Image: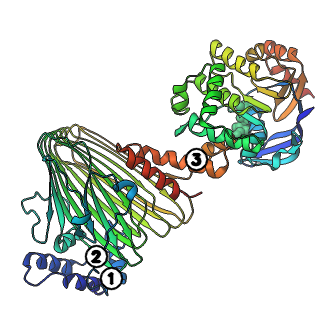
């Protein structure tokens, strides 16, 4: 079943078009990888899907779980089951993860017609999910991302994803800055949350993470367009040959 | 120009009998100089005199009050030691004076103000006005080496239910050597008529003493209030103050801290959240007079629609005050185009071996932070409130009295715009 359907999506920031016509369909149960050189528009795509306001949609349509995604407020997208693990999670002094997550989880549950969690139930679920990404409670009580190491930030993102139980998770360079152990932990968390009902988009420009989170489809984004799609072999090919051959193909095409 | 001010000075004039020479002299000086108005740098943004001329020209005397219940019960009901002033007058029936010998509390009446009290290097015409008009106050002495377990509260209630009110209390606080003490001043008002409070508090913190001084401003829009706080800190002593201001029509705080002895310290924190059509002004001055002193200042403002904030932070490092550490920061969040903040750091440094820094930021709620929280499913209003609370929390969390902190967190929550 199609969970996400992007058609001819064009989007700009500060008057400059970054996404130049993206088509992508993601079905429940699938893992898609989006790869591509720096600056090709991967984070822009993630931001547009999550609803960041600075990005202007010029053209195109996005259906998420049957709904017109682009019409929805960012919080409603999250409540409907879209989750973005940020490439650069923002620091919020004075707000800890536990601080906002209970309210967030309950607003999400309310939207989905589920009963609110009380403090005890919330804590219980939190403990389970903390184990999954090997994150410490003390970290969740600190100001969000303030003074966190790269790995702590990314694990915290995956922890929140586990708490919010999204239908579609978009992981934006969740592997960057991670050592191999942290990478394994993060990948383990993502894999454990996989089900036939949800899907994952992994944005990365290294093949490394894809050894752990094996994609069903791999797409190459270049200059705001998906210029190539294939299976996991494509990722290996990119790893071996770099992006230059793609760029050359584009020039000669 | 001066004519306009004479209105109110005449009103003041009638309150001091001809026989009271020293006070009459002060008033005559004020008549000659006039009260500061917008033309005076120090009162540019806070035109108190204009407001007084307009609202108090017809003032004759305070109405009798019959206040029998304490306001702000959330804070004061449990206060073990409480000195209450209603419309500037000591209210023994509502006060709870300390039982132990460590704290000596002496209510002051007209003319009994201590005279042998060092004058700090600070002057202000409204402070002179307080000297000319004050009839009451309290003298508090914390005995050498003592550390009373519970704080002492001073409540200033302005009750204008029966007519316009003016009050000019003057307090004298002395923390003797090696003592430790927490003083909480609460300013509260009720009643629909206008009130004008021009309060002064003089504090001396002796060697190795530590004085925590909390001020809570819960004034309503019918109150105009000036608050002069003059502190002298002796060597190795420390003075810590937290000022939380959540209302009032025009509130002006003058805080002067003289670091008089080596290794003296001062920590100054402020949070101001004026209500619509209200103004809160902080003029602070930290005076490093001798070497090896530290001061640290952080004031934060949340300014919603139709509110005004003023921050002026002076730091003086006097000649020879080497090895001074002085830090100052003022941060403001403006929530609406109709909100105004006038902020000005003013560092005057006459010594060369010092570490001083200051910074001020004024901005909106951070868009990235807001988006992050919304992307986690929080609605925009909840996300905004959470961020504002976090902004305020940096000051609120400094309050070591738990009941007070929780009470203020609740009030703050109710005052934060959705
Ligand atoms: N907020 C923004 N303001 C201005 N330019 C932006 C903004 N976000 C992205 N861009 C530009 O859009 C292009 C694509 O960026 P991005 O989506 O971050 O690429 P990727 O994630 O693939 O590295 C870059 O040229 C970048 O400079
Ligand atoms: Mg990116």
Sort mark 2 into few (<14), some (14-19) or many (20+) by Cα contacts within 10 Å.
many
Q: Quadrant of the C terminus of chain B?
A: bottom right
Between marks 1 and 2 in the image, the one whose residue lies nearer the viewer = 2
Q: Residue A144: percent from the left, percent from the top?
A: 55, 34
Tell me which label, 3 or 1, sits earlier in the chain: 1
Asked which quadrant contains residue A158, the reply is top right
Sort mark 3 into few (<14), some (14-19) or many (20+) by Cα contacts within 10 Å.
few
- What is the spatial separation of the Cα atoms under label 3 and label 1, in whole angstroms? 43 Å
Q: Quadrant of the N terminus of chain B?
A: bottom left
Q: Dot 3 corresponds to which residue? A: B366
Position of B394 with respect to A11 (left or right) is: left
Of residues A246 and B80, which is closer to you in this image? Answer: B80
Please tell me which residue is depicted at 67% across the width and 48% down the height of the picture.
B379
Q: Which mark is residue A201?
A: none
Tell me which label, 1 or 2, sits earlier in the chain: 1
Please tell me which residue is depicted at 19% across the width and 85% down the height of the picture.
B14
Asked which quadrant contains residue A150, the reply is top right
Mark 3 chain: B
Q: Residue A10: percent from the left, percent from the top?
A: 84, 43
Tag 1 and tag 2, C-beta contact below 8 Å: yes
Residue A39 visible in the picture = no
Tell me which label, 3 or 2, sits earlier in the chain: 2
How is the structure coloured here?
A: rainbow
Q: Dot 2 corresponds to which residue? A: B166
Whereabouts is ligand 1, in terms of quadrant?
top right
Between marks 3 and 1 in the image, the one whose residue lies nearer the viewer = 1
What secondary structure is found at the residue carrying circle 2? strand
Q: Dot 1 corresponds to which residue? A: B56
What secondary structure is found at the residue carrying circle 1? helix
Position of B347 with respect to B318 (left or right) is: right
Q: Both on one chain, marks 1 and 2?
A: yes
């Amino acid at each position: 079943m199609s969970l996400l359907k992007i058609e001819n999506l064009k989007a700009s920031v500060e008057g400059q078009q970054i996404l130049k016509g993206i088509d992508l369909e993601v079905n429940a149960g699938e893992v898609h990888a989006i790869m591509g050189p720096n600056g090709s528009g991967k984070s822009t795509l993630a931001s547009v899907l999550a609803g960041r306001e600075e990005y202007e949609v010029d053209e195109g349509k996005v259906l998420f779980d049957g709904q017109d995604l682009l019409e929805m407020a960012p919080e409603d997208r999250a409540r409907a089951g879209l989750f973005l693990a940020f490439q650069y999670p923002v620091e919020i002094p004075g707000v800890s993860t536990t601080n906002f997550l209970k309210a967030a989880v309950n607003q999400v549950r309310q939207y989905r017609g589920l009963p609110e969690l009380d403090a005890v139930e919330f804590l219980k679920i939190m403990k389970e999910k903390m184990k999954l990404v090997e994150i410490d409670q003390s970290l969740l009580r600190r100001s969000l991302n303030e003074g966190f190491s790269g790995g702590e930030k990314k694990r915290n993102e995956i922890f929140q994803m586990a708490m919010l139980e999204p239908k579609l998770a978009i992981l934006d360079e969740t592997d960057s800055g991670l050592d191999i152990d942290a990478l394994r932990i993060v990948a383990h968390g993502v894999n454990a949350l996989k089900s036939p009902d949800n899907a994952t988009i992994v944005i990365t420009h290294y093949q490394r993470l894809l050894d752990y989170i094996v994609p069903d489809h791999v797409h190459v984004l270049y200059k705001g367009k998906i210029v190539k799609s294939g299976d996991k072999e494509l990722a290996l090919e990119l790893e071996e040959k770099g992006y230059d051959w793609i760029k050359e193909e584009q020039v000669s095409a | 120009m001066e004519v306009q001010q004479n209105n109110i000075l005449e009103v003041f004039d009638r309150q001091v009998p001809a026989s009271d020479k020293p006070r009459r002299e002060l008033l005559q000086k004020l008549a000659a100089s006039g009260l500061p108005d917008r033309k005076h740098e120090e009162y540019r943004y806070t035109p108190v005199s204009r407001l007084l001329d307009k609202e108090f020209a017809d003032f004759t005397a305070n109405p009798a009050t019959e206040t029998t219940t304490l306001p702000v019960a959330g804070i004061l009901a449990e206060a073990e030691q409480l000195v209450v002033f209603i419309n500037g007058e000591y209210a023994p029936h509502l006060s709870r004076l300390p039982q132990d010998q460590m704290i000596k509390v002496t209510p002051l009446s007209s003319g009994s103000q201590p005279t042998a009290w060092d004058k700090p290097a600070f002057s202000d015409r409204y402070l002179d006005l307080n000297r000319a008009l004050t009839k009451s106050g309290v003298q508090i002495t914390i005995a050498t080496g003592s550390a009373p377990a519970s704080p002492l509260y001073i409540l200033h209630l302005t009750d204008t239910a029966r007519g316009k009110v003016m009050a000019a209390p003057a307090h004298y606080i002395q923390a003797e050597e090696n003592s430790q003490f927490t003083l909480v001043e609460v300013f509260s008002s009720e009643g629909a008529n206008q009130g004008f409070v021009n309060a002064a508090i003089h504090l001396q913190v002796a060697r190795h003493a530590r004085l925590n001084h909390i001020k809570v401003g819960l004034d309503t829009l019918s109150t105009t209030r000036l608050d002069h706080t003059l502190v002298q800190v002796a060597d190795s002593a420390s003075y810590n103050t937290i000022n939380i201001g959540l209302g009032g029509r025009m509130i002006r705080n003058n805080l002067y801290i003289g670091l008089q002895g080596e290794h003296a310290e001062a920590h100054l924190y402020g949070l101001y959240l004026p209500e619509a059509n209200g103004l809160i002004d902080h003029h602070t001055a930290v005076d490093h007079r001798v070497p090896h002193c530290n001061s640290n200042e952080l004031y934060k403002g949340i300014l919603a629609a139709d509110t005004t904030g003023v921050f002026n932070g002076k730091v003086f490092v006097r000649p020879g005050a080497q090895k001074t550490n002085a830090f100052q920061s003022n941060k403001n969040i403006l929530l609406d185009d109709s909100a105004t903040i006038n902020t000005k750091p003013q560092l005057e440094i006459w010594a060369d071996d010092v570490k001083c820094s200051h910074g001020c930021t004024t901005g909106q709620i951070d868009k990235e932070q807001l988006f992050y929280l919304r992307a986690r499913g929080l609605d925009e209003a909840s996300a905004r409130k959470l961020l504002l609370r976090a902004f305020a929390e940096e000051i609120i969390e400094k309050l070591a009295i738990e009941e007070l902190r929780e009470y203020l967190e609740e009030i703050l929550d109710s005052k934060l715009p959705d």
